[in-house]
Every structure is written in C-alpha cells, then in structure tokens.
Image (cartoon, helix red, strand yellow):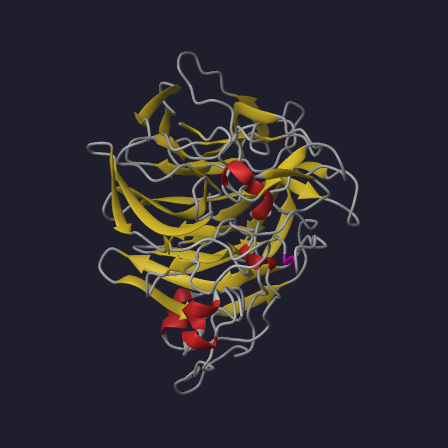
Amino acid sequence: MKRIGMVLVAALALAGCDDGGSAGGDAIVIGGGADATPMPDTGPMPDTGPMSDMAPEVDAAPDPEPDMGLPGECDGDPGLQPPRLNEHVAAWDPERGQMIVFGGNTAVPENCGFPAYTFETTTWLYDPAVAAEGCPPWTELQGGPSGRTRAAAAWGDGAMWVYGGRFRAGNSGPYQVLSDLWRFDPETETWSEVDQGNARPRGRFNASLVWDSTRGRLILYAGNSSGQINPTVLDDIWAFDPAAGEWSEIDVFGPAPSRRMWHAAAYDANRDRMVVYGGGDETAFANNAQYFDEVWALGLEDIGWTRLHEGGVGAPDGRFWAGLVHDTVDDTYVMFAGHDDQQLGNRNDLWVFDPADDTWSTVTAGDAFNRPANGFCDFPPDFTTIEPGTPERRNAHSVIWADGQLITFGGKTDCGATNDVWHWSPGDGWTNPVIATEGEMCIRWRANPDNCANMCF
C-alpha cells in the first residue's frame, strides 16, 4: 500500500471522483506537488487526471472521419452508439455472446466548471461478432432500474445482476444511496427487481459484486455507504442466494484488507476465490490520500483472506477505478487502466498477474508523462508521450472477459469521457472496433498533431 502524503498530483477532484456529498464541506486538492492548494468541494468534480478536460470540450470526431466500410447487408442502425458514458456497469453474457451495459453518467465538465450529473436508465447490448463484421454492434433497450451511477454488477445464473449505486435529483444536495437488487434476463430482455428478504447489507456505491459459480451466489464486498461529504468506507462481505432469496453476512477472522472503495474484483473459479486489487479509503479526498496497490484473495471455502502481492516494486502504481478480469484461457488476472497517484492521473497501462507465482508483468506500458501544464486549466498537446495503438487513458470504465478476450468500454478521460470499445487478447493485442466520437486527447486522434492547440483540441 502506498501513502502519498502531501504529494497529491492532480488527484481525485480532477478525476470526477467527488465524495458524493452536498455543496460545501471538506476541501479537495486541486493541482499537484508542494504547490497544491485546497478547493472547496462544491459537487461533482471534473472528470480527469491532471485537469486535462478543463480545456474547451471538443465535439469533433477523429480526423479524418473513419470509414464505416459496412460489407454487404447489415442489420441495425449504423449511427447507433452509446453517448460518452462513465460510472456505468457491464457484464458478459456468454450464451448470447454479448456485453450488457447499464446506467452511468454522461456529464462532462467544461472550462473548469462542475457538470450536471446524469443518471442513465438505458441498457445497451454490444455484439463483438457483429462488430468484427463491420456491422453496427449496438442495441438500445429502454426500461428497467431507476437511473444510477457507481453501482456493482456481475453475471451469473444466466442473468446480469445489479446492486445499489447512487442517485441525486437536481444538481445539489446529498445523494441517495441505493440498496436495491435487480436482475436482467437477456432472453426476454427485461429487468425485474429482486426480493432480498429482511436481513440485507446497507446501501452502497463504489462496491464490487462477483458471482460465486461454485455455490451459485453473489458476493458483495466493501464500498461507500454515505452520500455525504465524509465517506463511510466499508469492509463487510455479504452473500446473496437467489434460490433462498436472502442475504447472509460472511464473517472473516484473521488478516484482511483495510476498508476500501473503487477497488476492482474478479472471481477465480479455478481456485474458488474472489480477487481484489486497488481502491482507496476514507482519506481519498485529503492530502494524505491512499490508493492501494496490493492484491488480496478471499477463499470462499475456508473464508479467509490471503495477500497475494504487497504492491510496491514490480507492481502497477496504486490506483482506483481500474478494471480486473480473470483470463480463463491463460489462467491469469488482467488489469487495465484506472486513476493513479502519480503525475499522469488517468492510465491506459495493461498488466497481467500470474497466480501460479503471484507476480505482475507489464503487457503495454501505456502513455508516459512528458511535460507539465502551461498554467491553470492549460495543458500542452504533448502532456504525455502516447503509446500508439492503445486506448485513451481512463477510469470509471467497464472491463469484462469475453470468451478469450478483454473488452473495455467508455470511461472518464483527460478530455471528458468517451464511448469507444477496445478488445485485447494475448495473441492479437489491442484492436478498436468501435471508434470514439469524443473524449480522446488531440494528439491521439488528429491526423496531423501539429494542428492541436492544446491537449484536447
């Protein structure tokens, strides 16, 4: 675990990771290094790492305009694509070969302002096989749970499950912390609210949810249960049995991870355990913020925690809102992106953790810090040295494992938020079947980088 101390480089405030409270209250640090100064938390904060989406927002698509190149006859609307989306949830339906996306937020700050949060109710279905044919891969569905962000989701028992999240009516005041459980049936393409019985976990957001396929149950872990300025960070573990329709709390004795939110989690069926990486705690909005870089595993038969890696040397930088999946082909854990505690903020590096010897290895290093800001809200086009052929740096995105490949969609970027889709597999590397319509830094998408006035346009 890394303790940042007073060096908080373009931290949570700049990543859109507001504390979920009402206006006023605790200070959030703007800027980095010794010159960082506190700024009052006045609501949802800008959605980037180093204040990079502070530049005027760009509505232009990548230049030149990509050719759809639709072969033959294609079903679907060629113009149909989700909006820039972040803080959503996603799951992979292996029976139908589709990714299911629900909820999230489309708001993006402009010129250092605070965005009007949105709470989406749309369900999107993404078919990678259709995308590979060059045909429109998205289907849009209406109806289902109320709008929310920062929920937790998992796939299991032939359905997608969504728990909790947060909601706010209007642009100020406290958030409502949700505690409902929903089930999406992909066969009928309908949602139903699930009766959870009497004993149940407290409502929360920024939590994790995995499906324990050995016992046929959901495992809910940690998160934030307070919509106020000071987060109430949790470390409890609950199991939901769909057959019995009830929750039970899982007691763990012995060493365990500290309380956390914004962590990433995955279920490893080969070893019957839940694996947890990263996140932050209640100090996430202060100068002494902590972003975790350890890897923990919870054995679900003996109910005990094991720290697989203590972080530090040989590990990814500590971060929150990363994506973690179990590569069931190579039997490894794959981690992508998130927001770090270093100079970059948003990341696009890809790492693989080998559970055979509990070691990390870098697959793609991603963008590297190049030079700092010119001034407040003014970042140069070459703020980073980009790694070609990789996704834009991001957090609050979705990452799922889909029959031999990782698929990531959307998220908060240095230039707002995005709506692209990228695939990665050990054999083929990165491919980009759905191109972003917005949210990428200028030097990455312009045909001629010399035309970039700053990082975002």
Quarter of the image that includes the N terminus: top left
- Would you say the magenta stretch is mainly helix, strand or loop? loop
- Residue 319 location, quadrant: top left
Front residue (pair 169, 116): 116
**Above/below status of 125 relative to 48:** below
Write the residue at 20% across / 32% down.
357
x and y, in percent, of residue 404 in the image: 29, 55
x and y, in percent, of residue 10 in the image: 53, 45
Q: Residue furthest top?
A: 254
| Bounds of the magenta segment | 106-110
Compared across the picture, whether 447 is left or right of 222 comes to left
**Above/below status of 67 relative to 264:** below
Compared across the picture, whether 22 is left or right of 306 comes to right
Write the residue at 50% across / 48% down.
159
- Residue 334 location, quadrant: top left
**Above/below status of 428 relative to 335:** below
**Above/below status of 384 relative to 196:** below
Is residue 98 located in the magenta-colored stretch of the structure? no
x and y, in percent, of residue 130 in the image: 41, 72
Note whether residue 186 is visible.
no
x and y, in percent, of residue 35 in the image: 55, 39
Note whether residue 217 is visible.
yes
Write the residue at 44% across / 60% down.
98
